[in-house]
Amino acid sequence: MSANLKIAQFHDSVAVIGLRRFGSAVAASLVHLGHEVLGIDEDADRVQQWSDRLTRAAQADSTNVEALRQLGVADLAHAIVGIGGNIEANVLTVLALQEIGVKDIWARAISDKHETILKRLGVQNVINLEATMGERVAHLVTGKMIDFIEFDDGFAIVKTRAPQEAIGKTLGQSMLRTKYGVTIVGVKSPNTDFTYARPETVVSAGDLLIVAGATAVVERFAAMT
């Protein structure tokens, strides 16, 4: 069985196009999670570097529709365009993927204008690293949040310290959801495993809370801690 046929059989198989720092990190993580990964790059040395770590690695011009077809990319469930240094190649690769019928396309954007172009092309999954990391760092630098993830629909999940008013009480007693409109997803005590939050969960000094809710609401909650 050829590598091309092998990878095409898996529903969660992924093509990662562009194997520089971003693309290779994504590809390595996907392999670690057990997915079949086809890595594509036009640099032969880079392809050689990753040939033993991916299900298959191929040197190809990703803007060439016929090249993508020959590699079996149309048969894969997902494609990630990790090209960042060449906007033209990034956009043309997206167009080539659309032409061969790839349904689930993720594309890296290196600027807000680039993101706008990709969205106008119909790419729903745009990864704007600069914007995402800039916002995340802005939240973390104050020290109020230990981690912060915001989704496109104005929903966020944060890891933050427990407010003083919750210390020594169960979550049911402190009524944080009723008072602040947030959902306490879990509690992490020092040197213990993460536990999902329940009304009877007691919050102790030093505990971290995993909190979910509307972005503005969880921001205000974290600011109290």
Image (spheres, rainbow, N blue to C red):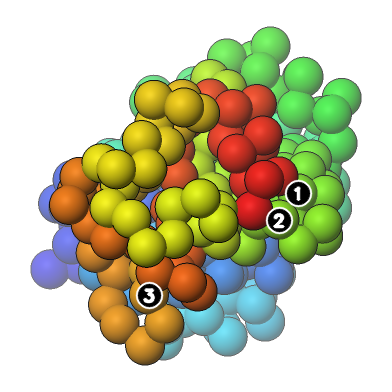
Q: Amino acid at mark 3?
A: Ser
Q: CA distance from mark 1 to mark 3?
A: 22 Å
Residue at 60% x, 39% y is: 221
Q: Position of residue 106 (x, y in %)?
A: 53, 38
Residue closer to the observer: 197 or 46: 197
For disc 1, the marked residue is: 139
Task: Using the rendered view, name the quadrant where residue 142 is placed.
Answer: bottom right
* Label 3: element kind: loop
* Label 1: element kind: helix
Residue closer to the observer: 76 or 65: 76
Task: Using the rendered view, name the quadrant where residue 144 is placed.
Answer: bottom right
Residue at 52% x, 80% y is: 50
Q: Is residue 119 above or below residue 161?
A: above
Q: CA distance from mark 1 to mark 2?
A: 8 Å
Marks 1 & 2, CB-CB < 8 Å contact: yes
* Label 2: element kind: loop
Q: Position of residue 146 (x, y in %)?
A: 62, 62
Residue closer to the observer: 199 or 165: 165
Q: CA distance from mark 2 to mark 3?
A: 17 Å
Q: Position of residue 12 (x, y in %)?
A: 24, 49
For disc 2, the marked residue is: 144
Q: Amino acid at mark 2?
A: Lys
Q: Amino acid at mark 1?
A: His
For disc 3, the marked residue is: 189
Q: Is residue 191 above or below residue 99?
A: below
Task: Using the rendered view, name the quadrant where residue 1 is placed.
Answer: bottom left
Residue at 51% x, 28% y is: 180
Q: Is residue 191 above or below residue 169?
A: below
Inspect this view and state whether residue 32 appears: yes
